[in-house]
Image (cartoon, rainbow, N blue to C red):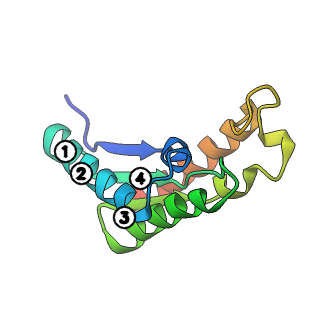
Amino acid sequence: GGADRILLVWLQGESDAIDGHSRDYYKERLKKLQMSLFSDLGIEKFCVILVGRFTGDSRDDEIIAAQRELCRDDSNFVMLTEIAEELYRDPVYMNPFVGGHYSAAGLELLGRTAGRALAEATLK
């Protein structure tokens, strides 16, 4: 048999921040992707792990706000966790060799936190 439910977990946005994309541009593009995935693959929910801070300036704010707004205003999007926005503050969660990327500990924390939230969301 096939899968009972198909959910997508999304952790992306740093490259859009680096490129300086606006909140509206990012929201429009992510909504187009979501609609295509729903149509083509039958994805039930587009679950978001809030993007982290990569540029360290207002470009991050645009993408973070876009993701929060989509999850707040569109029932097809579900925010799983917002902890990535703060992980950069603790070096244990960041890769010391590749700036702006998570360490194994950071990835494990993100995965565990998002996984719990996903389980809770799908039980509803």
Q: Residue at x 39, y 55 (%)?
A: 26
Please tell me whether mark 4 or mark 2 is closer to you in this view: 2
Circle 4/circle 3 CB separation < 8 Å? no
32 versus 66 height, above or below: above
Q: Amino acid at mark 1?
A: Ser
Q: Residue at x 38, y 66 (%)?
A: 70
Q: Is residue 38 left or right of residue 61?
A: left
- Residue 73 x %, y %: 35, 74
Marks 3 and 2, the one that precedes in the sequence: 3
Q: Amino acid at mark 3?
A: Asp
Q: Amino acid at mark 2?
A: Lys
Q: Is residue 90 left or right of residue 19?
A: right
- Please give the residue where the numbered disc 2 appears in the rendered image: 32
Please tell me whether mark 1 or mark 4 is closer to you in this view: 1
Q: CA distance from mark 4 to mark 2?
A: 15 Å
Circle 4/circle 2 CB separation < 8 Å? no
Marks 4 and 2, the one that precedes in the sequence: 2
What is the secondary structure assignment of the residue under circle 4? strand
Q: Compare residues 17 and 38 and report the one nearer the observer.
A: 17
**In the rendering, which numbered label is found on residue 47?**
4
Q: Is residue 32 left or right of residue 124?
A: left
Q: Compare residues 115 and 54 and report the one nearer the observer.
A: 54
Near mark 2 (Cα within 10 A), the count class, few <14, some 14-19 or many ≥20, is few
